[in-house]
């Protein structure tokens, strides 16, 4: 009975952290003018939307995923700083429960809601949410890649790792995290891992799955560049 009450309390705590985190980010929607880089990203998105859908005449110095999404936000919410910033506010809010469930999987339920609250109240995350910068999407995609690695989904780990790299070049820094996050967590289930531990090895299944995730990333990037 006590465990059931604790579980309900933790779910309500996570839900409230998401709502509060969203409110704190939304509060700053129109508090600051656009910075130089934000204005450039906004210009590229509008150029893509109205003039050059394939970037044949203007080539951004950033990969295109965020530019594409930002152009969609302008279409839905209006071509204004606030209309574009809603995108990152939503992305940053989605990162709150993702950080929570990742910590929960690694260290338990209490760690999950503590990590979720830390993300919801992080001044750094809050300040970057109401912007047109690429960083919130980079963090979301990289965190999804790591979570997929932890939950033995090598294909989706590769897809989200490629998404992080195609959002910002620094996404390559997530490669070691995804690689080592997958080691020892992919393979033939608990029974298979137990057998591998008895043999004293980490297991070929883990290596193959990690390699598969990185090959998926490479394939996705090659298809984009083509």
Image (tube, grey):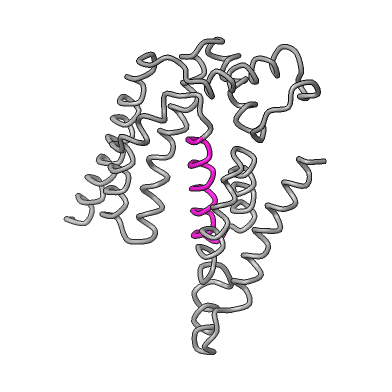
Vertical relation: 130 (above or below) 63: above
Residue farthest toward the bottom in the current orientation of the protein: 199
Q: Which quadrant is home to the N terminus?
A: bottom left
* Residue 3 falls left or right of residue 69: left
- From the image, give the main secondary structure of the stretch colored magenta: helix
Residue ranking furthest to the front: 36
Question: Is residue 216 positioned above or below 43 on the image?
Answer: below
On whether residue 140 falls in the magenta region, the answer is: yes
Q: Which residues are magenta?
A: 135-152
* Snapshot quadrant of residue 128: top left
Q: Is residue 143 above or below residue 27?
A: below
Return the x and y of residue 66 as percentages of the image width and height.
60, 30
At a point 33% along the width and 61% down the height, the residue shown is 107
- Which image quadrant: the C terminus? top right
Side (left or right) of 5 relative to 128: left
Observer-nearest residue: 109 or 120? Answer: 120
The residue drawn where x is 54% and y is 10% is 78
- Left or right of 208 on screen, residue 25: left
Q: Residue at x 52, y 65 (%)?
A: 180
Above or below residue 76? Residue 128 is below
Residue at 41 percent of width and 53 percent of height: 102
* 89 left or right, relative to 196: left
């Amino acid at each position: 009975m006590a465990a059931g009450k604790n579980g309900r309390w933790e779910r309500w705590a996570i839900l409230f952290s998401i709502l509060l985190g969203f409110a704190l980010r939304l509060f700053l929607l129109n508090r600051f003018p656009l910075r130089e880089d934000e204005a450039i990203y906004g210009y590229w998105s509008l150029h893509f939307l109205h003039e050059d859908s394939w970037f044949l005449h203007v080539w951004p110095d950033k990969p295109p995923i965020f530019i594409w999404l930002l152009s969609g936000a302008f279409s839905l919410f209006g071509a204004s700083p606030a209309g574009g910033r809603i995108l990152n506010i939503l992305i940053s809010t989605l990162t709150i429960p993702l950080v929570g469930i990742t910590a929960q999987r690694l260290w338990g339920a209490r760690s999950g809601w503590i990590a979720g609250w830390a993300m919801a109240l992080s001044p750094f995350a809050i300040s970057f949410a109401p912007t047109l910068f690429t960083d919130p999407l980079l963090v979301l995609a990289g965190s999804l890649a790591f979570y997929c690695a932890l939950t033995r989904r090598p294909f989706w780990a590769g897809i989200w790792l490629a998404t992080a790299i195609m959002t910002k070049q620094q996404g390559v820094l997530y490669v070691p995290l995804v690689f080592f996050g997958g080691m020892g967590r992919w393979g033939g289930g608990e029974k298979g891992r137990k057998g591998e531990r008895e043999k004293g090895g980490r297991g070929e299944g883990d290596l193959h799955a990690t390699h598969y995730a990185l090959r998926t990333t490479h394939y996705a990037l090659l298809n984009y560049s083509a």
